[in-house]
Image (cartoon, rainbow, N blue to C red):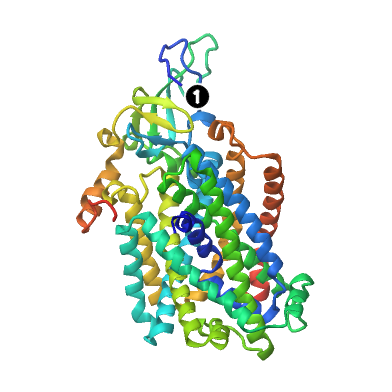
Amino acid sequence: MTIRRDQTAGLVLDAQLHLLDRQVLDRDGVPVSTVDDVEVGGIRPGEPVDPAAPPPVITDLLVGTEIATRIFGGRPPASRRMPISWRLVSDVGTVVRLGVAGDSLDAGWVERWVSEHIIARIPGGRHDPE
Amino acid sequence: MKRIFAVALGILTAIGGFVDIGDLVTNAVVGSRFGLGLVWVVLVGVVGICLYANMAGRVAAVSGRATFEIIRERLGPRAGFANLAASFLINLLTLTAEIGGVALALQLASGVDPMLWVPLAAFGVWIVVWRAKFDLLENVTGMLGLTLIVFAVALFLLSPDWGSLAGQALAPTVPSSESVATYWFYAVALFGAAMTPYEVFFFSSGAIEEGWKRKDLMTERLNVFVGFPLGGLLSIAIAGCAAVVLLPEAISVTSLSQVVLPVAQAGGTVALSFAIVGILAATFGAALETTLSSGYTLAQYFGWSWGKFRRPARAARFHLSMIVCIVVGVLILFTGVDPIAVTEYSVVFSAVALPLTYLPILLVANDREYMGTEVNGRGANALGVVYLVIILIAALAAIPLLILTGAGA
């Protein structure tokens, strides 16, 4: 499946059915996160949607802290958001695939921090299992 | 030999479900109090776990998605989180009990206080999870666990009255000394042990660890239909030994030494050493299974990188969470709690975890986006729905029965 990014003739996705809670894998198939929420551009919350307006488009996948608000409610502050730009998405199937390496993403900082500061310092942490 | 190793994943998974430390004792308790009157529950459980483990393994092989990824995707964040919390507590309590179980098995072999063995057992579990390749850990523990077959051998050596054993199994009655509620408490406990959710978490994630694809579906089926019936057989053999030796003498089972008593009586020291090796391997295997399952469920729910096919630094949060679980388990054991009693309470959390685990598996096994042409047939779906109803009834009955009977006392 390819994704066309033409504003008027894009791929129609049902966020609930095709995106939310699916795994996000990077270029090499390494899990990066799950899709915890999506940021949609072109509509404003609370305002009526003009039927004649162009359809809303996804701008970002949100990962990380959004999961807590989807379980318990509320909205996280904008500064806490960990977005992955929709432009990096290369495929949407049973998983969402990115066209870049996970290490290059800001959203992967927690995994990198735990890896560098804890796991890699334990003997054997950088070696393949035997 | 390669053929035997090919089914190691199924055997190890089943051992963790049917003959981990809690079930070793439960099976012997059941045998010593009800004879073979609860064998039918084990058979119902074996069919159920075969059905659903086969679905979970097929989904993993065909779509590449392990069970908790599917749970999150189908149930959404809230119900998925409820399942995660319940499953995680079951995992943690069982992991705690298994580390204690390894220590108890070592005590049986050496006579040294189990408290001294606990740190060593915990370190052993961690070092294997940290450094050993997946196929090494499943082959060694799966094969050594097979020595528990000594319980079946012992049953033959005891030359019991087969007619009366068959009578107990085929026409189950509640003994006059036991209440009906206690009978059903143990029925639910045995069914819960057979269908315990970490089996499908471990089996489906193990399928990914082994790199199974669509072409490996035959291997996957072989693992399911050899492993789980074997687990059920071991569970029945342990109950059978207790029914022949302990029931007539009215010996109540409270510890491992009573579990192995019939084996020692039937086959002497040699048989006893086989039983001890088997118990050690089974509890150690179950400890690995529950430790890895804790990591798998957390990582798959939150979308972390996971798997023993990656080096630890490439699956950092997965490994960190398992280290934390093992440390917490050791701390719980150091409070002096009885490891075997710990597993009895995990049945409470099954009430939430069982239905919320098996429903998404059934749904995705029918989804052509995931499965292509490998979706469930009508027979599997009909049986799957029947089992969902049984699971729901068992789950709802678990807590009232636990309270009513004082955990089967």
Residue B357: in sight, yes or no? no
Q: Is residue B264 toward the left or the right of residue B46 in the image? A: left
Residue at 62% over, 88% down? B251
- The quarter holding residue B189 reads bottom right
Looking at the image, residue A86 lies above or below residue B75: above
Q: At which x and y percent is residue B325?
A: 38, 62
- Quadrant in which the N terminus of chain B is drawn: bottom left
Chain bearing tag 1 is: A
Q: Is residue B389 toward the left or the right of residue B17 in the image? A: right
Q: Is residue B367 toward the left or the right of residue B107 in the image? A: right
Looking at the image, residue B350 lies above or below residue B315: below
Residue at 64% over, 55% down? B48
Q: At which x and y percent is residue B261?
A: 55, 86
Q: Secondary structure at mark 1?
A: loop
Residue at 61% over, 40% down? B363
> Which residue, given by chain and number where applicable, does mark 1 sit on?
A46
> As rendered, which of B371 and A96 lies closer to the eye?
B371
Residue lying at the far front in this picture: please name it. B1
Residue at 54% over, 85% down? B267
